[in-house]
Image: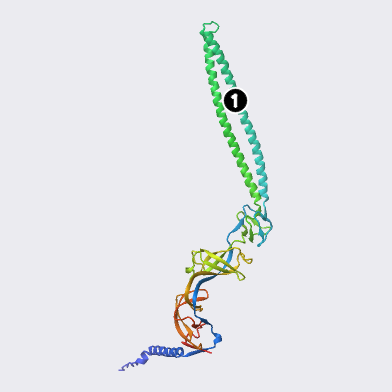
């Protein structure tokens, strides 16, 4: 009977991958120490240096932006029509009331004429109705006058018959006397009724006049509205301004509410700066701003800070001090520096590209000879556009290398030729 023998594995064979990994780590460690511990030689012309200074440290925040009108208006079409003529182009200076665009709408103009005719007919009908009402009122006044005459005639006869009857004269019978008394009461009542009818008729005439005038005024308002719509076919400037954009061309059909032209006041501009979101925490309202147009500089003040971040930046609006330079115009690209704070006595240095505010980094500082730079730890404070505050690790007059690259980051000492 054969017996299977099991070969025992050595410890090295069993854990060979672990030994290989540990050995590799030792090799890398010693190699790194050997490289880092060695010196790096560089030519002076390939390095950028900066000197640590002490004095007033100005903290600024920079951001790009554009100039934009403080107030602009889109001229919209109040009516539908076709663009017959476009009389202005972007950049044109216009005054309030100047004609910008001519629109045509034959249907609207025909409707205006029809409305004018309807108003003339309405005015004629209203005049006829008023004459008829006045005639009816005169008729009623005549009836009141006749009723009064009838009453006064009967009353006169009643007084005469009463006098004769009371004196015992036989000229008036009792029956005739009673008839006269009855007629007197009837004519008085008829007179009172006619007077009341006259009052009511006057109220009715007033009400009918008001109704006729109301309908007439409604038609006049309709005509006025139609006239305004036809007048709106002539698109005019509403303010003294510069034309920024014309949104239509001649021959184009326009619907009601369409934007036709954009107007902006050239002498009232503001700056819209895009400040990085990491720097916006130091910006507050009222801070001073210097706007650079590449040809001129304009002083301004922060008037608004957007509440939200957009594409890594926050919009800051800046009011500009007039008068503006001749090159200032809407949509002009600019750069702005916001004065955040001033520290009277501080250490600061030109800002290395790799340095961040309120961070500790290792940089190369030149020794007294200026031929050797050693790596030192430096704690930076608040940063500005081109400079940064030094809290510790450096002294006034020290020189540092601000053009560090990945190649020299592995070394602790640099020899400079």
Snapshot quadrant of residue 268: bottom right
**Residue 218 appears anywhere in the view:** yes
Residue 184 image position (x, y, % from top left): 54, 16
Crowding at label 1, few (<14), some or many (≥20) Cα neighbours within 10 Å? some
Residue 64 image position (x, y, % from top left): 56, 70
User: Looking at this rendering, what residue extends furthest in the bottom direction?
Assistant: 2
Which residue lies at the image location 56% right of the left edge and 13% below the top edge? 157
Q: What coloring was used for the rendering? A: rainbow
Which residue lies at the image location 59% right of the left edge and 39% below the top edge? 214
Residue 84 image position (x, y, % from top left): 69, 55
The residue lying toward the viewer, choosing from 289 and 3, is 289
Position above or below: 351 against 301: below
Residue 25 image position (x, y, % from top left): 41, 88
Which residue lies at the image location 55% right of the left edge and 21% below the top edge? 191
The residue lying toward the viewer, choosing from 168 and 399, is 399
Position above or below: 185 against 261: above
User: Dot 1 lies on which element?
Assistant: helix
**In this figure, which residue is indicated by the disc labeled 1?**
141
Position above or below: 386 against 28: above
**Residue 402 appears anywhere in the view:** no
Counting labels gives 1
Snapshot quadrant of residue 241: bottom right
The residue lying toward the viewer, choosing from 364 and 220, is 364
């Amino acid at each position: 009977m054969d017996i299977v023998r099991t070969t025992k594995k050595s410890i090295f064979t069993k854990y060979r991958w672990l030994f290989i990994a540990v050995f590799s780590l030792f090799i890398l460690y010693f190699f790194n120490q050997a490289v880092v511990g060695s010196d790096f030689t560089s030519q002076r012309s390939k390095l950028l240096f900066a000197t640590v200074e002490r004095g007033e440290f100005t903290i600024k925040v920079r951001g790009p932006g554009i100039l934009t009108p403080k107030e602009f208006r889109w001229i919209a079409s109040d009516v539908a029509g076709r663009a017959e003529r476009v009389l202005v182009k972007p950049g044109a200076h216009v005054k309030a009331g100047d004609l910008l665009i001519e629109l045509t709408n034959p249907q609207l103009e025909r409707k205006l004429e029809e409305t004018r005719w309807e108003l003339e007919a309405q005015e004629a009908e209203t005049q006829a109705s008023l004459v008829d009402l006045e005639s009816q009122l005169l008729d009623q006044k005549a009836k009141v006058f006749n009723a009064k005459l009838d009453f006064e005639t009967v009353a006169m006869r009643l007084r005469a018959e009463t006098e004769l009857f009371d004196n015992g004269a036989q000229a008036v019978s009792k029956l005739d006397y009673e008839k006269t008394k009855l007629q007197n009461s009837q004519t008085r009542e008829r007179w009172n009724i006619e007077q009341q009818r006259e009052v009511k008729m006057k109220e009715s005439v007033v009400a009918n006049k008001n109704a006729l005038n109301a309908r007439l005024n409604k038609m006049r308002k309709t005509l006025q509205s139609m006239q305004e719509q036809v007048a709106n076919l002539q698109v005019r400037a509403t303010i003294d301004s510069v034309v920024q954009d014309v949104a239509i061309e001649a021959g184009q059909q326009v619907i009601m509410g369409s934007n036709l032209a954009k107007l902006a006041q050239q002498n009232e501009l503001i700056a819209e700066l895009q400040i990085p979101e990491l720097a916006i925490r130091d910006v507050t309202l009222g801070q001073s701003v210097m706007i650079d147009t590449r040809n001129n500089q304009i002083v301004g003040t922060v008037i608004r800070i957007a509440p939200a971040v957009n594409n890594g930046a926050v919009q800051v609006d800046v009011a500009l001090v007039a008068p503006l330079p001749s090159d200032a115009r809407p949509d002009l690209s600019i750069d702005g520096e916001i004065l955040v704070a001033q520290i009277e006595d501080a250490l600061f240095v030109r800002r290395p590209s790799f340095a961040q505010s309120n961070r500790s980094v290792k940089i190369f500082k030149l020794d007294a000879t200026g031929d050797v730079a050693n790596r030192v730890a430096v704690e930076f404070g608040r940063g500005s556009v081109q400079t940064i505050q030094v809290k510790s690790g450096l002294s006034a007059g020290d020189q540092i290398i601000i053009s560090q690259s990945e190649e020299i980051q592995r070394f602790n000492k640099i020899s400079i030729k």
